[in-house]
Amino acid sequence: MKTGWLPLTITAVGFAAVGTGCATSGKTGALVGAGIGALAGQAIGQDTEGTLIGAAVGTGIGYIIGNEKDKEHAKELSEEARSHQYTHTEVGPLGGTRWQLVSLAPRDRVPPYASKIIEFRPYGRVITTTTSSDGTVGIADERYRVVGTALIVNKPGYLINATYGLSGNELIISADDFRAVLRRLR
């Protein structure tokens, strides 16, 4: 490769790095490593062969470094999830919100209650605090996931797979056998 190609190589690698929007550090590392390796190979060998060898070596080293960074990040998330007894981060727009149940149809789907407060916590836990007519309070701790417009709530023994919609301060949850309307508290 002639030295006149060096600016073109730098420009191409730069546009590739910006345009790809790599989803992982491993992919980003491979791309950056390829660019740095190509530049180093060109500087050392001053020919196409040196540039290609440099790009190949740089790609491998960059991927290894980026992949290790991805593994470290996954381990941190896993440790954080375990320390909070959370399950994941698929919480969509519900994570960190708190709601009061306004209506439930059919009402006899659950035992009588005076109020229900539902808190969608980050990392996939939903806490439902139910105050019964006699003033006793019960707390249910369940897992939830948001996938598109699907809200999946589960704990051992049952699974709720519903659709949800947000409209201002209102959350509407619908499944085959019930429909719930909740009002945002925070």
Image (cartoon, helix red, strand yellow):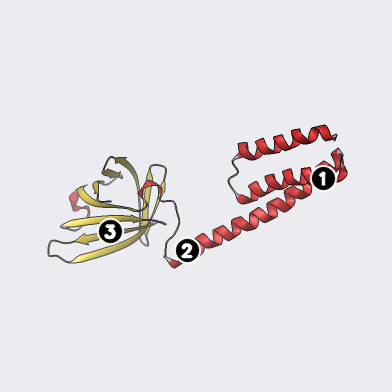
Q: Is residue 8 visible?
A: yes
> Percent position (x, y) of residue 72?
59, 60
Q: Compared to 12, does 123 lie above or below?
A: below
Contact, CB < 8 Å: mark 3 with mark 1?
Answer: no
Q: Is residue 55 visible?
A: no
Q: Amino acid at mark 3?
A: Thr
Q: Amino acid at mark 2?
A: Glu
Which quarter of the picture shows residue 43?
A: top right
Q: Compared to 129, does 55 lie above or below?
A: above
Label 2 element class: helix
Q: Compared to 150, does 129 lie above or below?
A: below
Q: Please tell me which residue is depicted at 60% across the width and 49% down the height of the picture.
A: 24
Label 3 element class: strand
Sequence-first disc among 3 and 1: 1
Cα separation, mark 3 vs mark 1, equals 61 Å
For discs 3 and 1, the disc positioned in front in the rendered view: 1
Query: Quick one: label 1, few (<14), some, or many (20+) residues within 10 Å?
Result: many
Q: Please tell me which residue is depicted at 42% across the width and 42% down the height of the picture.
A: 148
Query: Quick one: label 2, few (<14), some, or many (20+) residues within 10 Å?
Result: some
Q: Residue furthest left?
A: 134
Q: Which mark is residue 128?
A: 3
Cα separation, mark 3 vs mark 2, equals 22 Å
Q: Please tell me which residue is depicted at 69% across the width and 55% down the height of the picture.
A: 64
Disc 2 target residue: 80
For discs 3 and 2, the disc positioned in front in the rendered view: 2
Query: Quick one: label 3, few (<14), some, or many (20+) residues within 10 Å?
Result: many
Instruction: Name the foreground residue: 77 vs 54.
Output: 54
Disc 1 target residue: 41
157 on left or right of 41: left
Sequence-first disc among 3 and 2: 2
Q: Please tell me which residue is depicted at 25% across the width and 60% down the height of the picture.
A: 129
19 on left or right of 131: right
